[in-house]
Amino acid sequence: MWIVPALVFLSVTLPHLEQGAYRKDTGRYAAVALDAFEHGAWWTLELGPGRPYFNKPPLVFWIHGLVLDLLGPGVIAARLPSVLCGLAIVLLTVAVVRTMGVGRAALASGVVLALTYEFFRRTREISLDLWQLAFLMLAMLLLVQGVRRDRGLLIALSGVGVGLALMCKPFVALIFFPVALAWLLIMRRWRLAAWLGAALGIAVLIAAPWHVSMGLLHGDAFWDQYLGRQVLERAMGKINTQGPLYYPFLIGTTYWPWMIPCFMGFVVLVRCPRSTIVMGIEKRLLVLLTIWLGVWAIVLMSFPDKRPRYSVPIYPALSVFAGAFLVCALPIPWRDRARRFTMTIWIPMLVLGFLLALLPVRVQRGPDPEWTSLFAWLEEQGIRTLYSSGISTNEQGWYRLETGVWPVSLADEMREPVAAPPGALVLVRDDAPEPPVGEVLFASSGGRLRVVRVTDD
């Protein structure tokens, strides 16, 4: 029940973990995390010397920074904690189902989640959403075990998971409390519902010290960036805006082949209104997962800033409906085949994983050749420190990981433009807001990157 989903998940995540580059925000996150340990910037994170990084809480950066500090900068060191985090989510999903269901339903749910593309591909990056989900799944496990054993203390301890999740991303983890409250009230467990107040208190005790101290240390500068830009401006659609059909289209195009059994699992639940056990799982757990999906759907659909990684919290719940239907609700001949499939799929997946690892197969696009040529030129010239203009913070992070130092930013999304001093070497993109004028020392083959020596005037 535990080993099979774990082996399947590792088979699709470990092969060629070294391939590719620092995808999306990973370059920035990895550099900030490494700085936390190398330069002691672990409480007030820094995006380079003297540049506080107020965007996110620090817990994920502490975890990845420790591994990067021990193993050295590289994509494997950056991704390995994400793989372990994804594995933990798979096993926590199995544990949640096993608490209120049969082992075969738990095993199948874990296998479906392990083979969900939009879930396992998050391990190729540093994903705050993945870590937030891991701690929320811990909170959910404590919640269902508290109800199963009728122990309010376990429900109170679910606040530990929520508090740790709040140290991964701002405020989103608080969704857990309305979901848990609605579930307990529907089941008429009034006494246990009162323990959610203690859970909330524990969550606040875990998350408040860092937030309060940052406000005291940095004042409005922290709150304007952390609460203003990162929360309010995203909620108002000032950073990114997508239409209401973004997530239905994403799930409809990527959640295969699990879409059909997942839908049929919901149909079975609706058609068994008086049953206490549905598809080998206590109906009350399926009700909890339905509330979870409904609340997340409302939040995701109403939030204008939509990205694929934000949908990660829905996949464990969807996998339970798909997995339980396959092994507990299909007609008996097909059900037996589905059970054998979920119990034996680790064998072909393990073979496939070994073959992918041994063969020179490209499973991920390589680093940008313009940047690799730049790093080669810098090493040849013995140059490390550059100014930069028009270089994104993610690219600045990659530069820091490759060279050991941050470029001195003249203009990016985190800083107002400033002037480069005469004679400075400036790394410039062709879309820089005010590209400096001077002698071009390096130009990449694609023409997007240049190193310019600024003229005296």
Image (cartoon, rainbow, N blue to C red):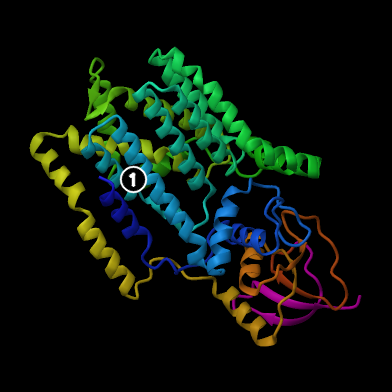
Please state the horizontal and vertical placement of residue 135, each as a whole percent of the image.
48, 40
Look at the image and tell me whether residue 11 can be seen. Answer: yes
Look at the image and tell me whether residue 118 can be seen. Answer: no
Residue at 23 percent across and 20 percent down: it is 272
Mark 1 lies on residue: 113
Decide whether residue 438 is among the magenta residues: yes
Q: Residue furthest bottom?
A: 380
Residue 236, placed above or below residue 444: above
Foreground residue among 428 and 130 = 130
Q: Residue furthest left?
A: 333
Please state the horizontal and vertical placement of residue 355, each as a whole percent of the image.
27, 70
Q: Quadrant of residue 392?
A: bottom right
Left or right, 109 with respect to 169, comes to left
Left or right, 101 with respect to 427, comes to left
Please state the horizontal and vertical placement of residue 171, each as a whole percent of the image.
60, 35
Please state the horizontal and vertical placement of residue 296, each as a whole percent of the image.
47, 32
Q: Quadrant of residue 338?
A: top left
Residue 380, placed above or below residue 119: below
The magenta region covers: 433-457
| Figure quadrant of the N terminus | top left
Disc 1 secondary structure class: helix
Foreground residue among 192 and 175 = 192
Residue at 32 percent across and 40 percent down: it is 94
| Figure quadrant of the C terminus | bottom right
Q: For the residue marked with disc 1, what is the amino acid?
A: Leu
Q: Residue furthest right?
A: 457
Residue at 73 percent across and 64 percent down: it is 432
Foreground residue among 183 and 197 = 197
Query: How would you rate the neighbour count of disc 1 (Cα within 10 Å): few for under 14, some for 14-19, many for 20 or more?
Result: many
Decide whether residue 277 is among the magenta residues: no
